[in-house]
Image (spheres, rainbow, N blue to C red):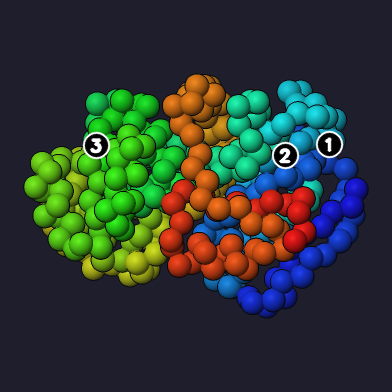
Amino acid sequence: MDRHYIEFTTPETVNLICDQLPPPADDEVLISVHHAGINRADLLQRLGLYPPPADASPVPGLEVAGEVVAVGARCEHLTVGARVCALTHGGGYATLAMAREDHCLMLPDTLTTKEGAALPEALLTVWYNVVERGQLSAGETVLIHGGSSGIGSIGVQMAATMGATVLSTAGTQARCDAVSALGAHFVANHRDGQLIEQFTNAGYAGEIDVILDIAGGDLMQANFDLAAPDGRIVSIGVMRGMQSEINLATLFMKRLTLTGSTLRRLETASRGRCFDAIREQVWPRVLAGEIRPIIDSCYPLSEVLAAHEHMRVGTHFGKLVLECQTMG
């Protein structure tokens, strides 16, 4: 089938290419992509700073939503015509994309494909890092940094539905208020400085069981100071720098666990296992409206550079998506 997809010939030059996609593999489905989610990994790939794995599509785009137009021989749950959102192994910035059947989630009539495209990467990121690696339990306190981001806005909602006390950070008072409306008990303004003091005054310093850190850099020591004894800190981003100066004595004295991950390198079987858990434990909350995607803006596929610039400057709240059946 004919596919149109985005190719970056240079970081600032984009072409719309047409080619033919083969039929899906036995365990895959072919999706007519109505919308694709934009992630910071896409920006880094475009800039040559985060190359895709060798077995991944070189076309950017890690999550899509649309209609299944072909299914592999071993697919058991999806049929042609099904509306789905899906995690892709690259290739999402296109009119057609492949995804494993077990990396797809059925979209209800209450969710548009624009909303659906905002969910797979965020749900998987939060589940794997906060629930599996961070071992968050009901009744614990969790800090989701960057609550106004696509991942953060889903993370705040998911943790709240799990019965956790949810804390977060954001960059303006208006954003702090909006993140609070998603279910956060307290949101610190990280641009005001004195992050430790803000959490101390709110009564949470040294009481946080799980921290999801998207920033790295100088924030890491603050995470150590804010964590409770036996706290778990999960690092998934380096927006504030790849180098951190930390006091290891804090790690020792509090018996902290520091871990991290990147989903692009997560084994296929592990992704499938996570999606099984999401399908059973989280997706019902999405269907019930307890977790909802927040869409800031939608761009035509041909305006991907403008969409990436929007993400780079960081003025969005929630998710940026591409409309992939509109060329411009």
Decide which of 54, 288 is in the foreground and name it. 288
Q: Which mark is residue 185?
A: 3
| Pointer 2 local density, CA inside 10 Å: few below 14, some 14–19, many at least 20 | many
Q: Which mark is residue 231?
A: none
| Pointer 3 local density, CA inside 10 Å: few below 14, some 14–19, many at least 20 | some
Left or right for 48, reference 67: left
Compare marks 3 and 1 and give the one earlier in the sequence: 1
What residue lies at 62% left-to-right and 68% top-to-bottom?
305
Which quadrant of the figure contains the C terminus? bottom right
What residue lies at 32% left-to-right and 34% top-to-bottom?
183
Q: Quadrant of residue 193?
A: bottom left
Query: Which residue has dot 2 on it?
Result: 66
Q: Which mark is residue 69?
A: 1
Three-letter code for the amino acid on which mark 3 is drawn = His
**Residue 201, x across and y down, in percent:** 9, 47
What residue lies at 50% left-to-right and 62% top-to-bottom?
311
**Residue 255, x across and y down, in percent:** 18, 45
The vertical placement of 127 against 261, above or below, is above
Left or right for 157, reference 233: right
Q: Find the distance from the CA under tag 3 to the CA under tag 2.
A: 35 Å
Which type of secondary structure does the marked residue at label 1 adopt? strand
